[in-house]
Amino acid sequence: MHIAILTFDGFNELDSLIALGVLNRIKKPGWRVTLCCPTPEVTSMNGVTVRAQSLLEEARDAGAVVVGSGIRTRDVVASPELMGRLALDPGRQLIAAQCSGTLILARLGLVAGVPACTDLTTKPWVQEAGVEVLNQPFFARGNVATAGGCFASPYLAAWIIARAEGLEAATSALHYVAPVGEKEAYVANALKNITPYLAQ
């Protein structure tokens, strides 16, 4: 299964890289997680340049897609060229968006009539796109999930793992990344937020 983490110039490192780390806790043949970018290199909001591991067009065939956030997301949604390269299908893909990534889903029509989560900065823009914004860290309906706040990134990753590999695998991945001395409480809190949306 290929999981593409859409990562644009100005990306938020906490969103893309934490998701990358948690999702890579699954060690099995065919499980591949990539930073999926519009160009061979992208530079983060804090000046960190990374090389693309896949390009946007490859997200069309991925089993799951995580739409990361960043300080240039409004530029992304205003670009017919970039938006035209995205062909996501919740009928056959798990699709998850973090913070301003929810705005991309809104512009693609993937959260039409569905409440969503995002960060406080992006909230008015998502509302302008006609989407109800929830005051909670995570929400999913069917194959589309959204999260709000940088540290909600593990929730998206765990949701994808739970949907693809089962709840035990998701619990193990969360337990690995959780702070020492807080592991049980951290995992319990994360599962409290995602498990209501697994049986849909």
Image (tube, helix red, strand yellow):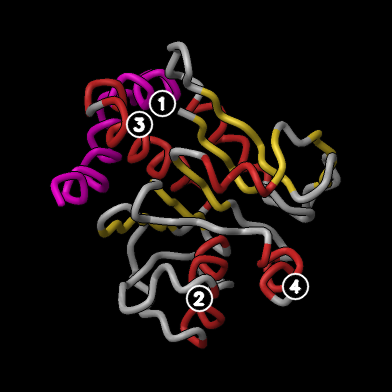
Q: Is residue 151 left or right of residue 68?
A: left
| Mark 1 or mark 3: whose residue is earlier in sequence | 3
Cα separation between marks 1 and 2: 28 Å
Q: Nearer the viewer, residue 81 or 171?
A: 81
Which label lies toward us, 2 or 4? Answer: 4
Give the label on residue 103, or none.
Answer: none
Give the labeled residue for mark 4. Answer: 79
Q: Main secondary structure of the magenta part?
A: helix
Label 2: few (<14), some or many (≥20) within 10 Å? many
Left or right for 120, reference 133: right
Quadrant location of residue 82? bottom right
Q: Earlier in the sequence, mark 3 or mark 4?
A: 4
Mark 2 to mark 4 CA distance (whole Å): 20 Å
User: Observer-nearest residue: 150 or 43?
Assistant: 43
- Frontmost residue, 111 versus 50: 111
Q: Alpha-carbon distance for marks 3 and 4?
A: 31 Å
| Crowd rating for badge 1 (residues with CA inside 10 Å; few <14, some 14–19, many 20+) | some
Q: Amino acid at mark 4?
A: Ser
First to last magenta residue range: 171-200
Give the secondary structure at mark 1: loop
Residue 161 shows which numbered tag? 3
Say what secondary structure mark 3 lies in. Answer: helix
N-term-proximal mark, 2 vs 3: 2
Q: Position of residue 4 (x, y in %)?
A: 57, 39
Pointer 1: what residue?
178
Question: Measuring 46% from the left and 11% from the top, which residue is drawn there?
Answer: 29
Instruction: Report the amino acid beneath label 1.
Output: Ala
Residue 165's place in the image compared with 115, above or below, is above
Q: Are marks 1 and 4 in contact (CB under 8 Å)?
A: no
